[in-house]
Amino acid sequence: MDNIAIKLLFTLLGLFIVLNWGLIQAGIMNKIVARVGKRIGMPVYQPYFNLIKLYSKRTSITHGVMFYLGPLFRLSGGVGMFLFMPLIFGSEYWSNFSFAGDVVLILYFQFFGMLGMALGAGEGGHPYSAIGVSRGLSQWTTIELPLTLAIISIAIQYHSLSFTDIVAAQQGGITHWTMWTNPLATAAGMLAFLGTMGHSPFDLVKAPNEIPIGPPTEYHSTFLGVLRTNAAILHVVESVLFMNLFFGGATSWFELILKTFLIYFWSVFVGVVFPRFRIEQSVSWFLKVPLILGILAIIFI
Amino acid sequence: MKKNSKLIWTPDRSKFPEQNSDGSLDVDLASQKYVKVWQGPNHPGVTGNMSLELTICGDEIVQAKTHVGYLHRGFEKLIERRKFIQGFTTCIRMCVAEPDTNEYNFSRCVEELSGIEVPEMANWLRALALEMARLQMLLRIVPGQGNTTGLGLGVQWGVYLRDLILDRFEELTGGRVYHMYITPGGVRGLLPDGFKQRMEDALKKIDEFIVDITKLMYNNAVFKKRTVGVGYLDPAWIDKFGVVGPNARAAGFKRDVRKDYPYLIYDKLDYEPFTATDSDIYTRSLVRREDLRTTVELIRQIMAKMPKTGNIRAQTPNVLHWKIPKGETYVRCESSRGEYGYYMVTDGSEFPRRVNLRGPSYVHAVSLLEKLLVGANIADVSSMMVSLGTCPPEIER
Amino acid sequence: MEQILQDIGKQFKITDIVKKRDNLNFITCEKEQTISLITYLRDIKGFSHFVLLSVVDWIEDGVFQLVYFLNNPDKKIDIGIRTMISRENATMTSAHHLWEQIATYQRELKEMYGIDFPGSPRVDESFILEGWDDIPPMRREFDTKKYSEENFFPREGRETNDPEEYMKKKLYPDEEK
Amino acid sequence: MAIEEQNKKNKFIDPDLEKREILSPDGEIIKIDPMKDYFCDAKPKVHEPANKVIEKFLNWSRANSLWVLAFGTGCGSIEIPSLMTSRFDANRFGVQMRPTPRQSSVFIISGYLAVKTLKRVIRSYEQMQEPRYVVALGSCTVNGGMYYDSYNTINRLDYYIPVDVYVAGCMPRPEAMLAGFNKLKERIKAGRAEGANEYAEKFDWYKANQKKIIKDWNMPDYNW
């Protein structure tokens, strides 16, 4: 059936657009952060240079097979999330391979890359990698709690575990968004979103002054290039996930770009003006406010 | 400030074994329970070029050893084979961050040993240079405390203002980092035209910065969470370890060389050093911010009270044949980190016999830090180092 | 200050009292009495702040001059206690039990001058230098320039001028020598 | 007892790196030599570019993305914050700081090098991935500067690691450092900044120089 071939083609095209948007978005965010620090900052296209340079660096290190596979697992986590994420509502070609239960699958993919990275980074043998991995996994476990509660609340609200249905239910004006119909779940979800993006105050996995720079300490050249590619894709896809869940999805590419930018900006905005938590403070923070919000969201739905 | 004893968190240092007198520790590293981690010298969280050898158990530090010597240039040996005027250009490089205290101490030692009285105007200008040096150092380390916890924004603002002060230094002395302004026998020049106005402009920006950094850092809930009650320095340790300067002031001891042993013209200035009692990282940082305020105030006072013009150099012997009779002396001044002293011995020749530097970091960063880190969390290591005002070059010279 | 010096003089044998400033005195004490003198000053006379432990190498006399520099933060006076020890097999009683930072000073002196302080914690551990196998570098007989020229590949073309000759040549080129 | 004799030869060796025999859980005695087992001691290789056009494109991207190792080796590091913040803002030219040697491509030797630091510098330099560049700041790295007669600082850096750009001065102003970065970019774009190849070619000479002053050589010859 040629339909599937065209769909695959559009999916790859979407991946390409998302990657580029991710890179440009990173450049814009760098620029904004620099402006807050009264600087001009690096050019918007700097992430492209970095990426080409990283792929072109030579490597001479071996740390075993798992070390190679770590970035690949991470990349497949990001791309996997993308594959099952409907991008544009109402368009058959831009909804990728979304299906009835894609919410559950995407939650799984979110954690998958993390685990693969943990296995690979542990192989590097650097003590800071190990500390970063243990910090990251314990923090992620607590992030998952409010996030999952928020998603369950939404699933109960809309009687569906499909993104397409959830987005469809939010159509018809700004007041139909989950943001207004289920504010508790939105609050819990957006607080969890801060944790997933890894900016301050939740950047303890890469904490530059404590454990520089955590799990990717040993990763370099092509490996780091793969990680950077994944980061660009993941940042957009994560934003799309939260856009679909809480902010009414997107009906055009322009809307998608605007909304993902604003959602990502929320985490950068918080990150610029806050220092970093210690790990036990971060864990207890997620177990307090966001978790309570998540539980309330389930109760009051 | 009220003392809230509930907030103070002192680690239970007794649950880990004490290190033996040869520095070894009775733990089994092969058991995988304890891990040895090196922080530095290539580590962004370590101030300057030094390293820490940490034995950790989980997130807690069991034993910490400071390793210094990465910046050792043998200054004290080099000065022994340089004439007094040559040694002067060498000694200022002992501490990169605040070279003027070195200039003053060395010049004062030489003047005292050869019996030279410095004219009044030179004393005012010396005090101005010392306060400006303190100001530029504090503009680095006050927001630097935020940087250790991941708040890099304050540093961006602070270093910009530091550049403004360095510009004033450039006008006054011609140098950006190394000034060589306070020479033995006086200072090198009077203030340039319009200096006071331009200095006042910079000081106004620093006043705004103090308000901004208070909002950004000191009132920040997460920053408070990270620093209040952490790194508690017992007041009983102040004399036991020889803690000086802001660290002692944060523990309730009013130790300020400018007040205690007035030098230059500091007895003509009106100010009061800020003291607090909580003695944790937050309080030490607060004391530094108040120091910044005081320094700005002092510079204003100096510029207002100083005479318009006057003689700035005393009569000195020919610098190429400057022989100083046998003698010894100790001169101290207040740097941004505390008491900064020079011990100089001369033997009647053209060369000094011995010059020894007493830097505050010598105790803060070696014996005190090693003790403070035991039982602390590995995430707080760099906060603690910065809050103690570590500056490695003055440890190893 | 005079009162304190008199009190010390009653109990200890001190010589060479030099009054440098109103609040700064240097005294010389015998090697055996030094540690008890420091303890006395710390516990009875309130010299609770230890400032500096330094060494001067008097190679002509064959002695090291150790200087313990104490400070009384309440009365704001300083005292420097000099002690002469022999350069051969230089040993000194350790004072690490009095102040914590003395152990660090003693570690440095052991490395830079070769003065041994038996019993001081970690005194044999290298402090600043690493892998040093020459004579301790801060001793007067150690020639740092020669060591540098032998080891560090000096770049050719470096000119060294005697400042006096050079200034004469620059400023008064016509003048006959 | 041959192992003990060998250990005695090198009196500075770290106890963790000594050859030793350990008892495995199965009751078997295993001999380990950490210097051989923990590190790879293969020599570096000279790398020839595959295709000149592609290499030119890659060099262009490398020149525009200089990641600097955040290792302040000397007093020049006091100007690095000024360099990276609003007045001079080296970020505009794609210069960033990276905390780990694996990910960085430029090594700033900021001023004098004590022998103890030189050992760490060599290790960090060898851990950096090729192509790698060295920018040396200050007169101290050129000929020793004012520390020419010090017993603990090296006189010229290019005897120990290949240097691409020297920025003279004591200490160099941030403007001079920016000019140095521009010079380095020109060199990279012209394909001349191949210090790593030079290091591989003259490996024995560099190693002999390094071992001459680092008396306690307790690491493998080439550790990446």
Image (spheres, coloured by chain):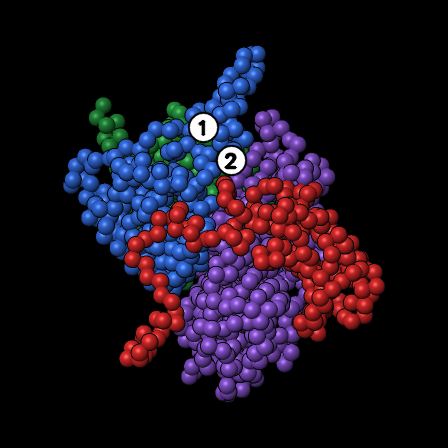
- Return the x and y of residue A82 as percentages of the image width and height: 36, 35
List the residue tagged with mark 1: D35
Q: Examine the rendering and report whether any part of residue B312 can be seen.
A: yes
Chain identifier, purple in the render: B
Chain identifier, red in the render: C
The answer to whether residue B27 is above or below residue A237 is above
Chain identifier, green in the render: A
Residue at 21 percent across and 48 percent down: it is D189
Residue sitting nearer the eye, D163 or C78: C78
List the residue tagged with mark 2: D12
Q: Residue B387, labelled with which disc?
A: none
Q: Amino acid at mark 1?
A: Met
What quarter of the picture does the N terminus of chain B occupy?
bottom right
Instruction: Name the front one of labels 2 and 1.
Output: 2
Of helix, strand and loop, which one carries label 1? helix
Residue at 80 percent across and 64 percent down: it is C9
Q: Examine the rendering and report whether any part of residue B290 can be seen.
A: no
- Indicate the quadrant where residue B26 lies: top right
User: Tag 1, which chain?
Assistant: D
Residue at 43 percent across and 25 percent down: it is D36
- Indicate the quadrant where residue A36 lies: bottom left
Residue at 39 percent across and 36 percent down: it is A219
